Image: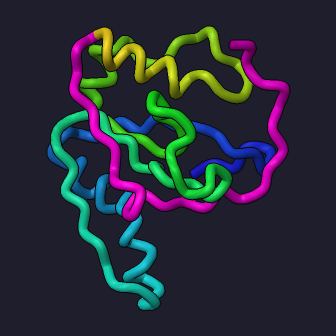
Amino acid sequence: MENVNNDFFSKIFDYPEDEMIKIYSSLNPGGQRIASKKRQYTAIIVPYRPTHFSSAINIFNYSVPYEEYFGGVSAMFRSQFEKLNGFSNEFWGWGGEDDEILLRIKAHKQKYCRLPTEIGRYKMPRHVRDKGNEA
């Protein structure tokens, strides 16, 4: 991974679809648990569809802030991403791109899923946000 001014960023990785099981394993929240041996490992089997992993983030009191939320950590196969025509170039600040990609998923009638909040738990480190995108 690159370090870009110590800020958080999104990066798109291009892997062959038969290699995606390795990627899903690295995104698996249980992976960190088994590495630390502090908690029981939770295996997640993700269907062939765009998936929202971070369904419970500490800054949202470990819940989904609104029904159409698709932000934080999500994944999809390259073929699915290309069908959506990728992310819009209209987003240059903080926020909005994840909601917009969900609109594209729905417009292309792709099914998507979200991990249950008991499994998709993430803690967001403190960081400075830019001014953001206007809604």
In the rendered image, residue 99, in percent from the top left (x then y), is placed at: 51, 23
Query: In the image, 92: left or right of 33?
Result: right
For image coordinates 57% across by 52% down, the residue present is: 1
Is residue 134 highlighted in magenta? yes
Image quadrant occupied by the C terminus: top right
For image coordinates 19% across by 39% down, the residue present is: 17
Between residue 68 and residue 97, name the one nearer to us: 68
The answer to whether 65 is drawn above or below residue 32 in the figure is above
Between residue 40 and residue 3, name the one nearer to us: 40
Say which quarter of the image contains residue 45: bottom left
Q: How many marks?
A: 0
Q: How is the image coloured?
A: rainbow
In the rendered image, residue 120, in percent from the top left (x then y), is placed at: 42, 57
The answer to whether 19 is drawn above or below residue 99 in the figure is below
For image coordinates 50% across by 54% down, the residue present is: 56
Q: Give the overall secondary structure of the magenta segment.
A: loop
In the rendered image, residue 26, in percent from the top left (x then y), is placed at: 37, 61
The answer to whether 133 is drawn above or below residue 23 in the figure is above
Q: What span is in magenta?
A: 108-135
Query: In the image, 71: left or right of 2?
Result: left
In the rendered image, residue 25, in percent from the top left (x then y), is placed at: 30, 61
Query: In the image, 31: left or right of 91?
Result: left
Is residue 95 highlighted in magenta? no
For image coordinates 79% across by 50% down, the residue present is: 127
